[in-house]
Amino acid sequence: MVVRLCGVTKKYGRVEALRGVDLEIPCGQVVGLLGPNGAGKSTLLRILAGMCFPSTGTVEVLGGPPRRHRARIAFLPEPGCLLPWMTPPQVERLARGLFPDFQVQRFRELLEFLEVPARPAGTLSRGERQRLELALITSRNADLYLLDEPLGGVDLVSRRRILQGLIRTWRSEATTIISTHEVHEAEGLFERVVFLNQGRVVLDEMAENLRAQGRSVAETFMEVFS
Amino acid sequence: MTRSFGVLIWLEWKRLQTLAAILAVMVFLTVLIPIFFSPDRIELFGNLYGARSAAMAAGLVLTLGLTVFSWARERRTGLFQMLLGSPASAAQLVLARFAGPAALLAVFLVVLNVATDAALGHFFQAKAHLGLSALAMIYVSGITVFPICAWVLLGFIFVLTFRSSGVSLAAMLVFLGGSGTLGALIVELLNTISGRLAKLVIWPDFRLQPEQGWTCVVKVEQVYQEPLWVMLGVTLGCLVLSGVLWREVEV
């Protein structure tokens, strides 16, 4: 198992962001982490990335505590990971220095494919910045990719580009967990979907099974949360 | 390992670039303004010394204030999460964060002191001892700038480790209270042990002698070396603690 969560809760003061989450994800799956705002998706991803620790319960990522294996985890946080002055070559410099598994050639190809302008991040549109960040994260040869809202707040063209970029960089041996609100557009990516609501897993199903029942992920999402 | 430390230092430099430019302008003005606005040489002497002391204090406050502000702002960005999740060790991350402001302040003090001493030497026809001026400021950096920077960094990381539990204010009060007690103990220790080792002859002191028609002499003073070693030890202790606490930081 790449990810193993057992009875995980996370409290911020009195607010309970996660409540007894149990989850196991094997190697190579592409998992959609879906749910409304405040469901606990970002908290769960942050725990898996080792950004924060659970209040109770145990977390194992790649066979140990997440921080021990942080070199093998590529995490795209929701606020974005670039400073306004960073241009694509400077992003490359940063990633080359920080991550030994960063693939320069793949990064340059992705920049071209995703049509990222060679300007500082502060002057890019939100969609362009998201594409640059996606190129940065997916250019790593990580074992686990955690993408927090990679499609959030970007236009349709950028969304399509990002999804194409994800497909292009997909590696069968790597596990990917994507949290998103854009269920309809991203559902073709998912092998498995985990629905979170108020910090609890309310549905954990293979996307194939849903389709076999004649339902899309988006329809199931609407059924569960409406 | 060297490459990731190099990148962390580069990030620090990018963060401090604007501040470095401001400090360079401060050095320039600290020397020029007294020269242009002092009516006579006696006034110039006092004004240069006064401006230098003011610039030192302002540079320290400005650097530390802006550094903490930029750390706090960065904490809210994804870059902080990326650094926390990178394979770079806690020691590298902490050392880079300390090295940026500490090196900038040390260079500022050395350049400021050398520039004002050169001006004093020039206007008062005294031998300026510029090498000693630089050395004196390295000593000052060792006993004040380095431990203060390390202490501020430790305080920031200490508060950060408790932030997600919602007790930032309590953590800050505990840190300040603990630091106050520790500070008193260090002063007591320095009072007890200073003077046991040989003094360092590094302090060039410009003095005007009114009895000889306001001629200027430069007297090289001796300073205790124990405070330097104790404060460097305090700096190291703060950095080690910061590294240990960094592993507990949550975002």
Image (cartoon, grey):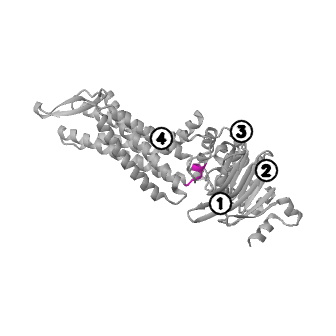
- Left/right placement of residue A165 relative to residue B41 reads right
Q: Amino acid at mark 1?
A: Thr
Residue matched to label 1: A9
What subunit carries mark 1? A
Question: Under tag 2, what secondary structure?
Answer: loop
Q: Amino acid at mark 4?
A: Leu
Residue matched to label 3: A105
Q: Earlier in the sequence, mark 2 or mark 3?
A: 2
Q: At which x and y percent is residue A90?
A: 60, 42
Total numbered badges shown on the rendered structure: 4
Residue matched to label 2: A26
Residue B62: tell me if it is visible: yes
Nearest to the eye among marks 1 and 2: give it. 1
Q: At which x and y percent is residue A108?
A: 70, 42
Question: Under tag 4, what secondary structure?
Answer: helix
Q: Is residue B79 magenta?
A: yes
Question: In the picture, residue B21 is in which quadrant?
Answer: top left
Which span of residues is magenta-colored? B76-81
Nearest to the eye among marks 1 and 3: give it. 1
Q: CA distance from mark 1 to mark 3?
A: 40 Å
Nearer to me, B247 or A109 = B247
